[in-house]
Image (cartoon, grey):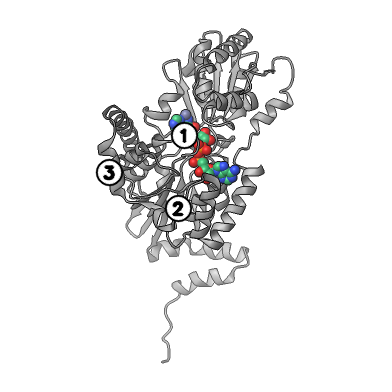
Amino acid sequence: MPEPFTGLPVLDLRHAAPPARWRQLCERSFGLDGEADQSARAIIAQVRNEGDPAIIELTQRFEQRSLTADTFELPTARAAEALTQLDPDLRRALEQAAARVRSFHELQARALVTSGRDTPGEQLQSRVAPLARVAVYAPGGTAAYPSSVLHAAIPAKVVGVDEVVLLTPRPSEVVLAAAALAGVDRIFQLGGAQAIAAVAFGTATVPRVDKIVGPGNAYVTAAKRLVFGRVDIDSIAGPSEILVVADHTADPELVAADLISQAEHDVLASPVLLTSDPALVDAVSAALHRQLDDLPRREIATAALRDQGAAVVVGSRRALAEQADAYAPEHLELLVEDPAALAAEIRRAGAIFVGPSTPEAAGDYTAGPSHVLPTAGGARFSSPLGCWDFVRYTSVLALGPAQLREQAAAITTLARAEGLEGHARAVERRLKPREPTNT
Ligand SMILES: NC(=O)c1ccc[n+]([C@@H]2O[C@H](COP(=O)([O-])OP(=O)(O)OC[C@H]3O[C@@H](n4cnc5c(N)ncnc54)[C@H](O)[C@@H]3O)[C@@H](O)[C@H]2O)c1
Ligand SMILES: N[C@H](CO)Cc1c[nH]c[nH+]1
Ligand SMILES: [Zn+2]
């Protein structure tokens, strides 16, 4: 028998400093440390040392699937076939989501431009160019995520990445169809930390990539963090999170529904209510109780609400913004009076959902911005997955002799102040008239 839901634990911040439990929730670290980090380290070392045989063994151990190296990759024709065979309603939904994600990112990509100064005798540029080969991870453990294929691969293709490699365990037909719609170039039916290690280092069968993007559970996230430096990554996009900020105007049934929508992702998901209305807490707990009753993923959602859930009560609207920033959630939903004004005060959130007609679930599927977002407080310093993730910039410098002469005194003075005589001489040598060489 699964444990019944017994109500959100209440953390009252109105009369005292934040309790230790709230500080603990604000410092959540799924995918950063602990058992997932230890396990991912061992898996990465095994794949790095042994290559394909390690992937075969680990896939058997963690996914109970028997692969051989020649079945790691699926032909893209399989994906094209899956798309043609897809249920028409499902195909239309996928196409609507894909079209909206694509058009949003086409607009976003316009901001990625080569910029700088181009005057006679001096060109100084930040030159932008797409990455060559990127891996997109789409989860496939306890649920299938065709939406993640769209939300990560489409921005890559919009920007012009040469080769998008999809990693996904147990790909379903709809995941394959999404890969075809997104224009994925290669598909590997690999998952977990072993898939991340494979593309970070390369094996006989799996190509090494320049960057790994996409969400995953704590093991996938820990592995991405550990291989960073060998490859780039997007962000820590681990177990899902939602902070619903609600006041006396909020409908408790909507608050509960949206908390559940993220709680059902993972037992490590974080669903939290932050409110200035103490009367809302009991109403939301009662609604959660009712709504969990016939939820297919009730056990997962109940565990997430029990272990990471809370109802945090504050005394003012200002405190709502302050505590939301302290928590820095992946998803922040505002069910308050004048939600747009409160949204403008928030500095730390992966995505903000403004008002009751904007459920977080719309962002997961069709709204347009990528649903791949930083978790574990990463919203303090990371951005949503976007077109910016699929380019890099190179500085290009071209000075004429007059420009070098103009800077020479500053360069040589600074070089000598740093004790780097060779730097100063490299400039002076160019300014001196050439002495004839005796050859
Ligand atoms: N932050 C975001 O942008 C975002 C977006 C979508 C989904 N998500 C999150 O993605 C996750 C999806 O998780 P999932 O589990 O369904 O799929 P997943 O593909 O991320 O993970 C499944 C893999 O984990 C590995 N694994 C399982 N148990 C293991 C163990 N004990 N040791 C080592 N490896 C193990 C297996 O290889 C398995 O294939 C959820 O946490 C969800 O909340 C996050
Ligand atoms: N909410 C997830 C990001 O945390 C994305 C997603 C995909 N499918 C459903 N939801
Ligand atoms: Zn979701």
Q: Residue at x 42, y 52 (%)?
A: 393
Please tell me whether mark 2 or mark 1 is closer to you in this view: 2
SS category of the residue bearing label 3: helix
Residue highlighted by disc 1: 143
Q: Which amino acid lies under the numbered mark 1 shown in the image of this protein?
A: Ala
Q: Earlier in the sequence, mark 1 or mark 3?
A: 3
Q: Which mark is residue 72?
A: none
Please tell me whether mark 3 or mark 2 is closer to you in this view: 2
Q: Quadrant of residue 402?
A: bottom left
In front: 419, or 149? 149
Q: Quadrant of residue 107?
A: top left
Q: Which mark is residue 80?
A: 3
**Residue 151 seen in the figure:** yes
Q: Is residue 138 above or below residue 248?
A: below
Rounded to the nearest whole Å, what is the CA distance between mark 1 and mark 3?
22 Å
Does the closest atom of ligand 1 sit within 8 Å of the Cβ of label 2?
Answer: no
Rounded to the nearest whole Å, what is the CA distance between mark 2 and mark 1?
20 Å
The spot of residue 345 in percent (x, y) is 53, 23
Does the closest atom of ligand 1 sit within 8 Å of the Cβ of label 1?
Answer: yes
Q: Is residue 398 above or below residue 433?
A: above
**Residue 129 seen in the figure:** no
Rounded to the nearest whole Å, what is the CA distance between mark 3 and mark 2?
22 Å
Q: Which amino acid lies under the numbered mark 2 shown in the image of this protein?
A: Leu
In front: 398, or 205? 205
Q: Is residue 361 above or below residue 109?
A: above
The spot of residue 132 in percent (x, y) is 37, 55
